[in-house]
């Protein structure tokens, strides 16, 4: 009986010790626990011209087809969104809707080369002659986003994201042209690249020879 009693006590003592150790371990874990908190805030929608690697292009430019002086009206073409100068739309927000557009630096801006100018937003005479706008120059620029290419970056889907409709600038009527937009249900916290948007410029008859330039601005809301 004595031996059995000793064994019983030993077993009970072992169980007690195990229970105590477990309680002590739990208490130690609770007292040393530290909660980590991280807040990630939304960004702001933006638009940029980038390379295929995603680096910002410092001085983006579009070259139009070269043409010779002509006593007749002419059309020249260019492409907005070449592979290494692609338009990138950023939506680092939880709001699905956005609109990206292009416009002249001002409604009164013109193609300029020294003292010679022609317009980008005059719809008169099929776009070749001066109409009732604020300047004295003919000429009109058409933008064709519908024929462009839209691609998600890093796996972003393009569902409910669409390219804009083809249009031409007309002062006071069409001062900006939508190139792409996100509708309700479009992916959030995503990026998209837009390439191969066609541009067509109507040049008035007898436009003086020169190296002309025009500034356009991309924006997103």
Image (cartoon, rainbow, N blue to C red):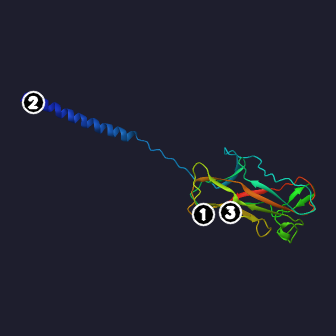
Question: Between disc 1 and disc 3, whose residue precedes?
Answer: 3
Q: Which mark is residue 164?
A: 3
Horizontal placement of 133 versus 40: left or right? right
State the quadrant of the C terminus.
bottom right
Q: Which mark is residue 4?
A: 2
Q: Residue furthest bottom?
A: 132
User: Dot 1 surroundings within 10 Å: few (below 14), some, or many (20 or more)?
Assistant: some
Quadrant of res 12:
top left
Query: Which residue does the numbered mark 1 point to in the structure image?
Result: 183
Reply above or below: 116 against 59: below
Horizontal placement of 157 versus 5: left or right? right
Out of 148 and 10, give the one closest to the viewer: 148
Residue 9, given in percent of the width and then of the height, sits at 14, 32
For the residues labelled 1 and 3, the Cα–Cα distance comes to: 12 Å
Give the label, 1 or 3, closer to the camera: 3
State the quadrant of the N terminus.
top left
Residue 76, given in percent of the width and then of the height, sits at 83, 58
Out of 38 and 131, give the one closest to the viewer: 131
Give the label, 2 or 3, closer to the camera: 3
Q: Tag 1's secondary structure?
A: loop
For the residues labelled 1 and 2, the Cα–Cα distance comes to: 81 Å
Give the label, 1 or 2, closer to the camera: 1
Asked if the residue at tag 3 contacts the one at tag 1, i.e. Cβ–Cβ closer than 8 Å, the answer is no
């Amino acid at each position: 009986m004595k031996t059995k009693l000793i064994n019983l006590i030993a077993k009970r003592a072992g169980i007690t010790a195990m229970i105590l150790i477990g309680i002590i371990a739990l208490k130690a874990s609770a007292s040393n626990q530290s909660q980590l908190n991280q807040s990630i805030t939304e960004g702001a929608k933006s638009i940029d011209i980038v390379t295929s690697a995603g680096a910002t292009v410092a001085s983006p430019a579009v070259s139009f087809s070269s043409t010779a002086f002509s006593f007749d009206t002419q059309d020249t073409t260019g492409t907005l969104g070449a592979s290494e100068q692609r338009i990138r739309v950023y939506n680092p927000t939880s709001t699905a809707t956005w609109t990206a557009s292009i416009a002249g630096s001002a409604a009164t801006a013109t193609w300029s080369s020294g003292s010679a100018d022609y317009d980008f937003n005059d719809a008169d005479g099929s776009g070749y002659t001066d109409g009732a706008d604020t300047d004295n120059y003919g000429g009109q620029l058409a933008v064709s986003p519908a024929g462009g290419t839209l691609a998600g970056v890093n796996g972003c889907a393009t569902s409910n994201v669409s390219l804009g409709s083809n249009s031409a600038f007309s002062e006071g009527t069409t001062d900006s042209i939508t190139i792409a937009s996100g509708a309700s249900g479009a992916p959030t916290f995503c990026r998209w690249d837009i390439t191969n948007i066609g541009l067509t410029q109507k040049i008035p008859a007898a436009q003086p020879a020169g190296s002309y330039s025009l500034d356009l601005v991309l924006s997103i809301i």
